[in-house]
Amino acid sequence: MNKIVYPFVLCLLLLFYSSCEKENQPEIITNEAGSQIEVVGDIKVSTFKLPNKELAIDRLMMIRHKLRSLTNDAQYEFDGRVKEITSSDIICELHIPVDKVIPDGDYWLLLAAVDDSHIVATQFKLTFENDMVSTILQREPNYKIFKGEGTKDNPYLVDDMLKLSLVLKDDSTHAKGIYFKQDVSELVVPMQGDATDGRGHVSYPFAGNYDGGGNEILSLTYNGASNETKDSDVGLFSALLNGASISNVVLRDVKISNAGTNVGAVAAHSSGTVKLKNITVSGSVKGTNNVGGLIGTASGNLSIEDVTLKLDVSGEGERIGGLIGKGESGLSTTISKVQSTTSFFVKGKGFVGGLIGDIKGSFTIADVVLKYSVEQADEDIAILKATSNYLGGMIGKAKLTGNSSISGSTIKLPIKGVGYVAAYIGDLNTDKSSIGIELVKNEVLQSRISGTNDVGGFVGSWQNVKVNALKDLTQQASVSGTTKAVGGLIGYMNGADWQKDKVSGNAITSVHGITAMEQSAGGVFGYVKNIKKEIDVSPASFSIDKLVSVNGADAVGGIAGRAVNCVFVGDVYFDVDRNQTIKNKKGNSSFSGKINDASEYSGSATSSGGLFGWIDNCTVSGVMGNGVVQGRQRLGGIVGRAVESTLSMCVKKGEWVLAQYNDVGGICGKIEDETVDMRQVLNFSSVKGANCVGGIVGCVEAKNGNISHLINVGDVEGSGKVGGGIGLLKTTTSGNNSKDMVTVEKSVNFGDISGSYKGGEELYGLGGIVGSAYYLVTVKECANHGTVKALSNSTYNGVGGVAGVLGYNEIGGYHYTSSPNIVKIYNCCNTNTVITEGNSSKSRYTLGGVTGRLFYGTNATHNVDMHDCYNTGEVLGKNDRDNGGLLGSIHKYASIHECVNFGRVEHGNGGIGSHPNIEGVNAENLYYLKGTGKGWKATEISKSDAEVSKSYKGFDFDKHWNMNDRPTLIHCEYQFAKMPVWNETGN
């Protein structure tokens, strides 16, 4: 080897130049390639050009030229310098002693610092003639200096900075198919002498295979100025190309700051098939857009396995991810065995994810654990944070182009964003409804998830993606939003193809609560709509801890806050018959927690229910709720507000439903419907509110329809219209069209019903089944077995064992008009006490054993009608108007017939109490047991006569009546019913 080194040559040349006269300047020889040579003293200065884009040298410097002959492998080293830098070329000076010659031929040229502290890793194949470069043949890294053969079985060994710098450089094939293995414990990323404007490391593409051997690469450094032109595409490599793999390496103390777009500790980009395995990254990566802890922007097929993140990843813009910033359209990625440490943070403007900021493709994610414990007092800390929309513990936003999955993973991080925020995926959507996702055996441990809208324990917004599996999910985090659509699992869901047999074993134990400050908070869904198949909400699908509380200003429910165009089913079932109210019962509660128990919502929330807050065009069946429900108005033990919806086979158990204002029911607060459909529902809970309070429904507004098999056991209390079944039943039309009727039938009350109305309006009623009902209403085959009590100093217009007030016309007040009520009550009975507390003689209302008051009918048609009813309960009151064993008060053109009273009337008549206007009143075939009251418009019968059917003129013992020791009804299946008991088999 010929090695000539003159470190002091430059100084000698400068002295020589300064001492020479112009006429003594040496001759300069130039060849066709533009290279030059001249003799200066005892040095031959050979000048040539190299392409700047291959070297990216940014400063004048002393360099060493390392030459290796392709003819005989002889090696030469000469000092020199970078003479000039242009936009396209680096002009180099090679200093050859005058007594030395570079033999003509082909050589590999490598440039290095004079002390070998760093190296320009690209080597050039050059032809020398007469000590001048005549041709640049090709360029490539200098792999000849490596030990090994670059194969999988015998990789090139990377054992010093020089060799690492060669790996980090580029060649014409980007090292495709070449294998490298690090053979020393740590290597510092070399400056390489080619950093742009002093910013730090310059990146190049790589398609080879680098095995770190479990060793470290230290101090990858880049300090930019956030210049999108100069500071983009930053990473250890600028791109990982098809076939590239990086494995078994620790990138320690990464310091990338003020970078631009496409930034990652490993690579700015990846494309084709790329594999990353067993990688640990520590330090910080900071850029603007498309910033990832490993990869800035990815496309093709990317596999990431066994990664530890000790990294602070941040971006001033969008698409920021702990692993990948942006997944290009069509990306297919597999991610497994990823974990974070206490040094892990991801923050950006929007599209921010613990793993991926934004992806348009498909993914398979498994065994990911991202944890960071934060004390409750440190509630402002956010490990994952976005200042704009789309933030997810796993993925900020995902638009699926293929089936995807997440399994076996854990999130325990404070997550704070704006819209579309969740522990797993902020926004999940697809253009193809056949594409779905599996979420299986994942958990969100105790942490906090907060945003504005569309905030979920697992998914913030879910649109059109098929549910391939939703199994064994555990959600413990508190979830909150400052506006709407906040859910324990899913904030907002629209258009999903729900596969109920693919949903099971999901547990929600968010003991610190789920809150939407404005609207739509739910234990499972905040807002759910347009779901194509049944959603099973039984505990087999969603098990919600009894300590979970759901809070919000409006539309709050234990399962869903707001639901539109959905069918919800549970596992609850029971049979009913005329002797025993419940048999063959089965099923468990879907929610046993608390609705609006937080002080700021307990007195102000609206449209809130034990399972559903506000439903529209939905069906709810086979469900049970055990939770406490509180708020202001439209509150229900199962549903707060139901619009154009069907409720059946619903059960409410547990504690109370409590409203500060109107429309509160044990099952539903308010029903608004064209055709109401409600059947076979059962309430055990106490219900308390102001106006329109019912053991089953607070208020029903409908044009027509059927309400049947309402069973209320709980006590009901209000200060307005109150009923054991329905507080207010009002049809939305009036007139003579009997087809537009709402029918309440085959219903029963066992609870104590009490009211304290103190106003002066005529339509306020208190009843065992219905408080007030008017326009086009039928009440039939109903039984009341509970006490109906008007509390002290109340001023009800009518108090009845079955119905308080029947009939009313808003157009003409409570007087007769040409657009009348059609109100009928028949085949009903009352068996318990109807009472006014305090027995004030100044009380205005009337009491009736069956009905408190019948309002006006139409001339001669008697379309306000009561018939075939009986009472056995006491009627106790000393108000200033007469009370009746059957009817408290009857108005003009109303009718009552074929009824009998067996209950004692303390002050009043055995049949009808008062009669403000007797004109047109039809009262026929009314009977009362001797000693039970006075006899206006009714016939007294003795005890012995009461046991004989022929005593009852006009009674149809084939169609309406049976005869035992007294008349009973054929069609009132609950008249002998026992108070139901439901022994829990589950929650």
Image (cartoon, grey):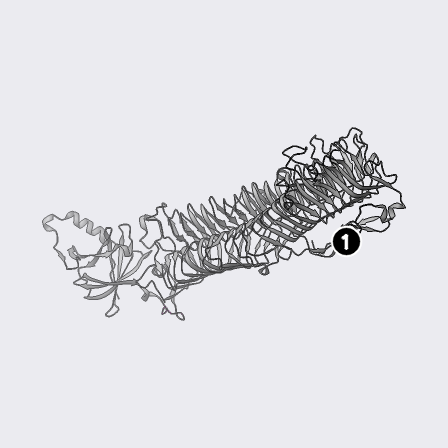
Q: Quadrant of residue 832?
A: top right
Q: Quadrant of residue 742?
A: top right
- In the picture shown, does residue 714 fall above or below 65? above
Q: How many marks?
A: 1
Up the image or down, 873 lies above or below 249; here it is above
In the rendered image, residue 149 lying in the magenta stretch gets the answer yes
Q: Is residue 348 visible?
A: yes
Q: Main secondary structure of the magenta part?
A: loop
In depth, the one of 984 and 365 nearer the eye is 984
Disc 1: CA contacts within 10 A as few (<14), some (14-19) or many (>=20): some
Q: Is residue 873 left or right of residue 132?
A: right
Residue 949 x %, y %: 85, 49
Along the viewing direction, whichever of 143 and 289 lies nearer the viewer? 289
Residue placed furthest toward the left: 23
To which residue does mark 1 refer? Answer: 578
> Magenta stretch?
147-152
Is 334 in front, or is 619? Answer: 619
